[in-house]
Amino acid sequence: MAEHNYAQVLRWIADGKSIQFKTCTGAWADEHHEHTLTRCANGCTGFEYRIKPRTMWINGREIEAPLATAPESDSMYWVPGAFGVDYSRWNDGALDAKALAEGRVFSSKKAAQAAFDAITSLLVHQPTE
């Protein structure tokens, strides 16, 4: 038997995760569990869901928090560096573990760039937006 289209989303709800859905404009919006459950019960399809990313504040800017656990082996990750954002593949090495422990591993280039920009704004004393 095939798994229900939204089985993973239902597991996230059961685990108490905050979830988001993609709107028609492509933006992510917070979703109330009751709405998701109603959609699933009514057989609505075509919605894309994700676990809401954890965020943090740096110098008045809300950014996606770095990863708390290691990504899957050989998956891409991004690190804010001295001159911008660098990327690598996770290989469970000592450098990867050090970057994770230091809170410098991000799941997307956009998140790493936002962290780089927020940290740089502290160093050059830019006012908050």
Image: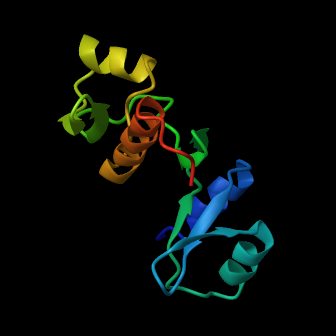
In the picture, the quarter occupied by the C terminus is bottom right
Q: Nearer the viewer, residue 86 or 11?
A: 86
Q: Residue furthest right?
A: 34
Observer able to see residue 10: yes
Q: Nearer the viewer, residue 42 or 47?
A: 47
Is 123 left, or right, of 51 in this rendering? left
Snapshot quadrant of residue 42: bottom right
Residue drawn 64% across the image and 54% down it: 12
Q: Where's residue 6, x and y in %?
A: 56, 70
Residue drawn 29% across the image and 39% down it: 77
Q: Where's residue 84, x and y in %?
A: 24, 39
Is 33 left, or right, of 114 in this rendering? right
User: Relative to residue 116, is residue 1 depicted above or below?
Assistant: below
Residue drawn 37% across the image and 39% down it: 116
Q: Nearer the viewer, residue 40 or 35?
A: 35
Q: How is the image coloured?
A: rainbow
Residue drawn 75% across the image and 81% down it: 38
Q: Where's residue 107, x and y in %?
A: 37, 44
How many numbered discs, if any?
0
Is 127 left, or right, of 18 in this rendering? left
User: Relative to residue 114, is residue 4 depicted above or below?
Assistant: below
Q: Where's residue 117, x and y in %?
A: 39, 44
Observer able to see residue 5: no
User: Relative to residue 37, is residue 60 depicted above or below?
Assistant: above
